[in-house]
Amino acid sequence: MQSGNPALNKNTFLDAASGAVFTRGDEAMTINGTVNKTGLLLILVLVGAMVSWSRFAGPDSLPTMMPLVLGGAIGGLVLGLVTVFKKTWAPFTAPLYAVAEGLFIGALSAIFEMRYPGIVMQAVGLTFGTMAALLLAYRSGLIRATEKFKLGIVAATGGIFLLYLANFAMGFFGHSIGFINGSSGIGIAFSAVVVVIAALNLILDFDLIETGAQQGAPKYMEWYGAFALVVTLVWLYLELLRLLSKLQSRN
């Protein structure tokens, strides 16, 4: 069963470990090692965000922010794809990805903050609050990554991706799917559903990382597991930012 996070699938750790279980602790992936590397990547995201945020000085600086938005988004996409297909490069590409995504979300967040003061801290708080709550639910067994659960999340995530892709393609012809960015009741409901799906992808990620550690995946997979979690957290943050902006625009 594939994770809704494109960085993870059922063969991720088995392929990396060639089906073997390592016996030497210094060679095998661990949960603690993945947690530490996730923390490091999040710090790098924060550093990149602070750099781009510091360049924002009001509406007049918008032209200087767009290269950071586009450059960070494209750079993050390229580095993310490289990491997915070259997992052994994760110790090098994952930190670079984190910095690129930081530049992207920092610039984008500054623009949102200009329009909706206070929205960024709300989105950040909700992102990490959601992660903590779901991690607790997963560790306590309240939510289990059953096959049916995985199937539902993967199908929903794939549907959202196709919808966003269609909206992007329609943009070249001057059209769009209104409720994706609109603040109507349907638009808000859609964003709320996407936020829930993005959040539930964390459960799949937790499960697969735990499985990788249990099966003795190579040490570099700690970087890959951390990268996968950051991918999901960035997506969740952006969707929360979109949802909060829709809600505030109606006030």
Image: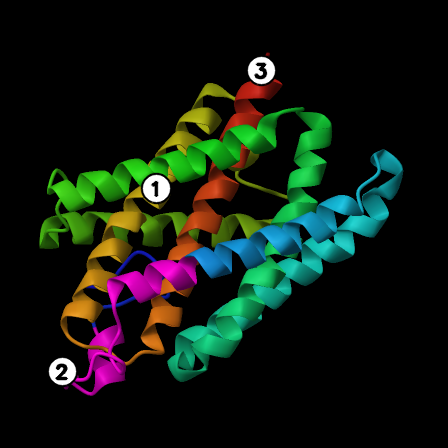
- Residue 164 seen in the current view: yes
Q: Residue at x 22, y 40 (%)?
A: 136
Q: Earlier in the sequence, mark 1 or mark 3?
A: 1
Name which residue type carries label 3. Arg
| Image spot of residue 34 (x, y percent) | 33, 64
Name the element at disc 2: loop
Task: Please tell me how crowded label 2 is: few (under 14), some (14-19), or many (20+) other residues with Cα within 10 Å.
Answer: some
Task: Please tell me how crowded label 3 is: few (under 14), some (14-19), or many (20+) other residues with Cα within 10 Å.
Answer: few
Name which residue type carries label 2. Val
Q: Where the C terminus falls, by quadrant?
A: top right
Name which residue type carries label 1. Met
Write down the residue under mark 2. Answer: 21
| Image spot of residue 213 (x, y percent) | 20, 69
Q: Is residue 198 above or below residue 17?
A: above
| Image spot of residue 71 (x, y percent) | 70, 62
Q: Give the number of the disc on residue 131.
A: 1
User: Where is residue 85, by image quadrant?
Assistant: bottom left
Q: In the rendered view, does 220 fall on the left or right side of 70?
A: left
Q: Earlier in the sequence, mark 3 or mark 2?
A: 2
Find the distance from the CA under tag 1 to the CA under tag 3. Answer: 27 Å
The residue stretch that appears in magenta: 11-38
> Between 94 and 159, which is closer to the camera in this rendering?
94
- How is the model colour-coded? rainbow
Task: Please tell me how crowded label 1 is: few (under 14), some (14-19), or many (20+) other residues with Cα within 10 Å.
Answer: some
Q: In the rendered view, does 244 fall on the left or right side of 145?
A: right
Q: Is residue 49 above or below residue 71?
A: above
Between circles 1 and 3, the one closer to the viewer is 1
Write down the residue under mark 3. Answer: 250
